Image: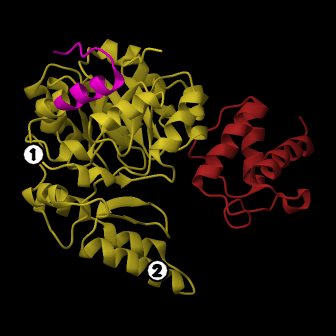
Amino acid sequence: MTVKTTNPIFEKLGMKYPIVEGGMTWAGTGVLAAAVSEAGGLGIIGTGYWHGEDVRREIKRAKALTDKPFGVNVMLLSRHIREVFDVIIEEKVAVVATGAGDPSPFLDELHAAGIIVMPVVPSVSLAKMMEKKGVDAVVAEGMESGGHIGMLTTMALVPQVVDAVDIPVIAAGGIGDGRGVAAAFMLGAAGAQMGTRFLTAAESEVHPNFKAKILKAKDIDTIVTGNLLGNRARVLKNKMAKSFVKNEVNELQKEKPDAEAIEKLESGTLKRAVQEGDKDGGAFMAGQISGLIHDEKPVAEILEDIWAQATDLMGVENTTK
Amino acid sequence: MTDAEIFDKTKEILVDQFDLEDDEVSLTTDLTNDIDADSLDLFEVLNRVEDDFDIKLAVAEDIKTVQDLVDKIKEQLAA
């Protein structure tokens, strides 16, 4: 059987490679998203808890660098989502990826504006619910990913989601080279998403300390915070991450554990990692494949090399050459 | 559909999903504290409720107890 390496959505977007940039708050800037889209993937601007005008600024930075379609990742827990969606619709962004919730209340207006909607899902049931509500694709993300994560691994989650829904499934989590991308297609996915791999791209604007930490990382160098009190997030090990986990354990031993007090410890730490490179106090959100990344190179080269390896492994023609 | 029928059908879903005995599910059962449902379990329940009752629910529904779930189903059936 021939492996199908594209899907109607990617074809509509005119993508050269079936590869999407994962939504990364602070790290997924307009500049990086533009570089990914310009090189033939689908760049995604990460927006976290931003206000609408912050999102507009990054969209404008991306538009200044590329005419190709790109997306915006919206964190649905944010208090500012109404204004963020208004900006996205005004700016005619091509794709909305969503995390942490249900985008369906906004689906009609996004579709009316011609925007493709693809939520990130951590389980089969959520994927099925999203399909029923009419989203265009789902990103099935395994817990190998950096940042906020679910419980299942990519290897287990993706084929089960693929079997459960009829819309395109994009595999995410633990994909950092052509082997991972080929594996995603073998699992039945219609595309692959990568986040961490792009953090060390030449166009990535994360602090040099962040890039250095990924390049130095080994397989065992990530840790999951929030395991005990919710909001699980994978970060590179450092003082902040280790003390966070210790504090969680201590808090749980109290008669009335205060989850909010623990979550406060995390406040602002991602920005400190991305923009200030705060080695001890930052939350360096990155995936388990950090140990697989050994070089900093332009996005175009990353995509070209990965797709060459993936197509070779899958035995399909590399039509991008 | 009567309230009792909605509850019975909801109970059936919960009993099956969490491997419970019938008498372990009442209207006051707290999904998180009494039957240790995590957020992924809740999605599974909502998904099955949607299919079995042929209704649509929002993913972020504020559902803590079986009563909350039954109320939400009643609301959607009436919509």
Q: Nearer the viewer, mark 2 or mark 1?
A: 1
Q: How many marks?
A: 2
Is A319 one of the magenta-colored residues? yes
At horizontal 42% and vertical 44% (from top left) the residue drawn is A76
Q: Which mark is residue A249?
A: 2
At horizontal 16% and vertical 60% (from top left) the residue drawn is A216
Amino acid residing under circle 1: Glu
Label 1: state its secondary structure.
loop
Horizontal arrangement in the rendering, residue A10 relative to residue A298 (left or right): right
Q: Quadrant of residue B51?
A: top right
Residue stretch in magenta: A305-321
Mark 2 Cα within 10 Å, few/some/many (few <14, many 20+)?
some
Quadrant of image for the C terminus of chain A: top left
Q: Which chain is home to disc 2?
A: A
Q: Is residue A56 placed above or below A5 in the rendered structure?
A: below
At horizontal 20% and vertical 42% (from top left) the residue drawn is A198
